[in-house]
Image (cartoon, rainbow, N blue to C red):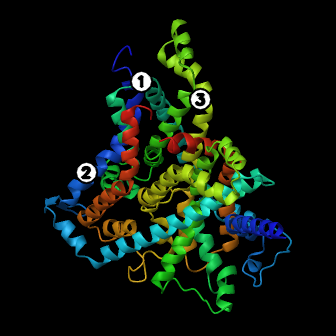
Amino acid sequence: MLKLLSHATKISGMALFMLWSVGPVLFIVVSSLKQPIDIFAYPPQFLFTPTFENYVSLWNSWPAFFETMGNSLIVSIGATALASAVSFLAGYAYSRFSGTWLAASAFYMIAIRLLPPIVVTLPLFPVVDFLGMSDTHATLIVLYAAFWVSLFTMIMKTFIDEVPRELDEAAFVDGATRFQTLWRVILPLAVQGTLAGAIFVFVFSWNEYLFALIFTTNAAKTTPLVISEVMDAIYGTDWGVLFAGVTVQIAPVVALVACAQRLLIAGLTAGSVKG
Amino acid sequence: MTNRFAALPFLAPVHLLLFGVIALPSLYVFWLSLNESSYGTDLVFVGFENYRTILTDPYFWRAAWNTFVVVNVIVYAELLLGLALALAFARKIPFKPLIFAMILVPYAVSEVVGVLVWKILLNPNFGLIGRTLADLGLGLNWSSSPSQGLAVAALIGVWHHLPFTFLLLYAGVLSIPQSLYEAARIDGAGSWQMFWRVTLPLLIPAILITLIFRLVFAFRMFSEIWLLTKGGPARLTEVLAVYLYQGAFRYADFGAASATGWMMVIGSLAVASIYLFEIHKRMVKGDA
């Protein structure tokens, strides 16, 4: 009896956690399939005929939304590619070389990523403006990558540590240059680490708000920014269309995270738990 | 080692990026904080005047206090919930990958979307939860009550970052060798004893890292407050990042904003100092 009770507590506890995590997102997705008039019906309707009307309106009446999706995609892919490339190189160096200066630079690299991002916006804002770089994809790409290369480099170091040094030496004996070894030998064997790091950067860049708010106005505006603008418009928010847009915005990343559980755990273990 | 500079080309890109985007700007903020400046005006050196300005500004202290309270509430709530989840997942549960994926969902969602959906759900006039609460006589009104504004922001913060906390703790739980549990079982330990004598002591490093990471990252909190209350009513729900943003981009007082920024840098490093000290020790020993 007591065992049954403790089982029941555990199951309902888990169910609560699941509702807490998924409920709000489910609310958006389900609402996006309702007639606008039914979205805020109280008590809520759980049984209804789904309609894609909101998605049709999104497509027809809010083309700017898809432009910002395009910006988000460019910025996220750009930041992920930049961070992956530089972190892979640095991870290799930290794995294969050693020395006082190297250790000191690794320490500095970890310490510096702990600084609050908003602080760097103060001096960068006028500089970016002066360089004519405000409201460009490149600015966001560089900023997003910079705040992730520390963790990413540590992830790469841990994964490259697992690749036996004998392979480097064998390639060297065969006459391969360092860069050839890196590209042909190390990268294929450390691809899991690259993917793990890449997911963190991509999810961050896809969802980031603060830098986008400060450094973009129009041409490079990302989706979170446009969602925030619409939700704050007090009058005439078309909730059905907004929910359809939000569903489109979150779907790819939620799917990515759901499929990449193992990579996320591996990445966090490699990048932070081991230091 | 053939050449002590051989590592340089591999390290240069990362360190250029970090130096140009984070290190140099952060140091420059200190210089800015010693000057008077606004849009289109030259810097005028004023010494520590900006620090005097913010340290005598009641709004700064209000923001600092709000940050302190909200950060602590968020981080410790996450730690408890995350620990419960991590321990639950260490056992056999049915549909594990599916439930795991569900728990991770908030991590994949933008802060903007998180604020949007909770704002709607909790709205006392048309929100699913808010209206139910209102019917029970607990009508929320965070646009006029600062403590409710902060509480809702903390709730959204926990919702968002629990998956990250959980992942860090779960990675720690996974690294505890199963053989220890078997040995404890042979010695006749019950599950409660196993938790106190085996799991918890071995989990302390993971808990510490999680705590410091989350403290440092929660300290930056901006979006939840900015999107929920804009720091209002009457600047009473501002946190430090919002105070800084207002100073720089609304009042165009870059000197005072930079002084706030430099205080945040010092605060972050102070919180992280234990972690950094530990890492430094391990690096000196050469096994990091």
Q: Residue furthest top?
A: A174
Residue B28, numbered label: 2
Chain under disc 3: A
Query: What residue sits right under mark 3 in the picture?
Result: A190
On-image quarter of the N terminus of chain B: top left
Q: Amino acid at mark 2?
A: Tyr
Residue position for label 1: A97
Residue drawn 33% across and 35% down? A104
For label 1, the SS is loop
Seen in the picture, residue A124 relative to A243 is either above or below; the reply is: above
Say which amino acid is labelled 3.
Ala
Secondary-structure class at tag 2: helix
Residue displayed at 57% across by 27% down = A162
Q: Tell me residue B64's x, y (percent).
A: 35, 71
Residue at position x 47%, y 29% in the image: A89
Judge whether residue A217 can be spotted in this image.
no
Q: Chain of mark 2?
A: B
Q: Is residue B50 visible?
A: yes
Q: Are marks 2 and 3 in contact (CB under 8 Å)?
A: no
Image position, residue B257 (x, y; %): 29, 64
